[in-house]
């Protein structure tokens, strides 16, 4: 299949007609203020990137028990909602569209980040085997999480529902359910982390139950045409494994078809996934399964993204590091202009440096 479609072809994404298919991927930057509240600094950062067809915010915890890293924003307190209003107003003033990514980290946390110092929760009492928890006091060994009781799971779903309601109050255009990267919904989906014997464990259908219940609840708040879901079928980040990821994710992706979502957001396999023993499943395997708009992510450049869209392999492409360093990435792509190089030392935490001070293209032309 070939077509004239490219990154700058408009697309109907659920409720919205996007002017281009260049999406800003969700990017944790650890720059929320005290109380995990967004600030004017965050509003400037997102507004600078408003020429994207769609902005997806950094992962945002739906409960204080869902926090896994310092200074990541939440969407569960009135102060956080007011902080996010600064962001949405700034983006909308620049003509942009912005979805909030709803997040619960599950076991990828530490008691020092939890209210009252309690254990993080997970589908099963299995600690991550790689890396360390990131805390305000620096890296610390992961603890063995507490397995959620069956009767607690409606409460987890309710946290996502309330987060979705709060996102609407904050002025967002939609939300993305974070089901990727080894966080809570991913932990339930995969059999390496889910050893439950109740209705949320064992079979693929049971392991996918929480993801689908959360999606259904969020769709009930927003309508399906303003909701996306993100998955990482090949991902090994945060010590994730599955005995048959093709079957697991094939089932989950097919089940998501029934909602008529705005999009499905898939992470491509990476070299790191392969190094850590993951099963490398190209997105092309899932393309025939998913019937709606497919967004892809991982190490795409302009030409690779254009080729994916022209071939029908994807409908949209999200960009991470390139958007960190190039607030005007769509304009640079369209002009085939040079790109700023990102500074990894400023990715996580800090102030304006490496956050809102990358120059736009017009500032480099003399």
Image: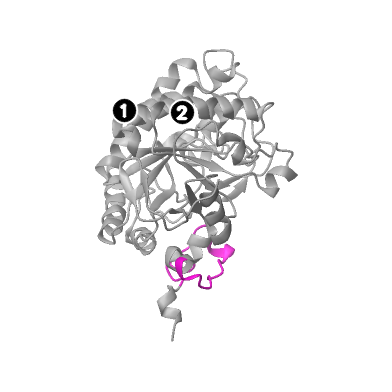
Viewport quadrant of the N terminus: top right
Count residues near mark 1 (Cα–Cα under 10 Å), then give few for <14, some for 14-19, many for 20+.
few
Q: Which residue is mark 1?
A: 220
For the residues bearing labels 2 and 1, Cβ distance under 8 angstroms: no
Q: How is the image coloured?
A: one colour
| Image coordinates for residue 169, horizontal then vertical, percent | 25, 42
Write down the region rendered in magenta.
334-358
| Image coordinates for residue 225, horizontal then vertical, percent | 33, 36
- The correct choice, above or below, for 135 with respect to 209 in the image is below
| Image coordinates for residue 110, horizontal then vertical, percent | 55, 39
State the CA–CA distance, disc 2 to disc 1.
Answer: 14 Å
- The correct choice, above or below, for 364 with respect to 161 in the image is below
Taking the image as shown, residue 189 lies to the left or right of residue 84, namely right
Residue sitting at x 44%, y 74%:
361
Could you say which is closer to the camera, residue 237 or residue 332? 332
Viewport quadrant of the C terminus: bottom left
User: Looking at the image, which residue sits at the far bottom?
Assistant: 366
Q: Which residue is mark 2?
A: 256
Taking the image as shown, residue 366 lies to the left or right of residue 40, namely right
Q: Is residue 68 magenta-colored?
A: no
Could you say which is closer to the camera, residue 357 or residue 82? 357
Q: Earlier in the sequence, mark 2 or mark 1?
A: 1
């Amino acid at each position: 299949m070939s077509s004239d479609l490219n990154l700058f072809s408009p697309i109907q994404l659920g409720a919205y007609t996007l002017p281009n298919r260049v999406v800003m991927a969700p990017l944790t930057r650890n720059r929320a203020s005290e109380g995990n509240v967004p600030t004017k600094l965050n509003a400037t950062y997102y507004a600078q990137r408003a020429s994207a067809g769609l902005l997806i915010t950094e992962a945002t915890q739906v409960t204080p028990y869902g926090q896994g890293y310092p200074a990541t924003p939440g969407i569960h307190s009135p102060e956080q909602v007011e902080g996010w209003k600064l962001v949405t107003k700034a983006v909308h003033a620049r003509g942009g569209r912005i979805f909030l990514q709803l997040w619960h980290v599950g076991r990828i946390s530490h008691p020092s980040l939890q209210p009252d110092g309690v254990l993080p929760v997970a589908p099963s009492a299995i600690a991550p085997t790689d890396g360390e928890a990131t805390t305000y006091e620096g890296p610390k060994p992961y603890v063995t999480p507490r397995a959620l009781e069956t009767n607690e799971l409606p409460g987890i779903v309710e946290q996502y529902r309330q987060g979705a309601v709060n996102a609407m109050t904050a002025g967002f255009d939609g939300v993305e359910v974070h089901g990727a990267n080894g966080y809570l919904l991913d932990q339930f989906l995969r059999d390496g982390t889910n050893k439950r014997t109740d209705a949320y464990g064992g079979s693929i259908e049971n392991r996918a139950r929480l993801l689908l219940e959360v999606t259904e609840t969020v769709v009930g708040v927003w309508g399906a045409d303003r909701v996306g879901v993100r998955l990482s079928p090949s991902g090994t980040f945060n010590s994730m494994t599955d005995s048959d990821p093709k079957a697991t994710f094939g089932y989950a992706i097919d089940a998501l078809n029934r909602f008529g979502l705005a999009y499905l957001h898939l992470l491509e396999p990476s070299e790191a996934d392969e190094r850590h023993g993951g099963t490398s499943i190209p997105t092309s395997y899932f393309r025939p399964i998913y019937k709606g708009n497919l967004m892809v992510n991982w190490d795409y450049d302009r030409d690779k993204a254009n080729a994916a869209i022209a071939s029908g392999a994807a409908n949209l492409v999200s960009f991470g590091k390139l958007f960190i360093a190039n607030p005007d990435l769509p304009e640079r792509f369209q002009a085939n202009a040079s790109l700023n190089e990102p500074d990894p030392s400023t990715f996580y935490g800090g102030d304006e440096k490496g956050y809102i001070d990358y120059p736009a293209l017009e500032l480099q032309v003399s």
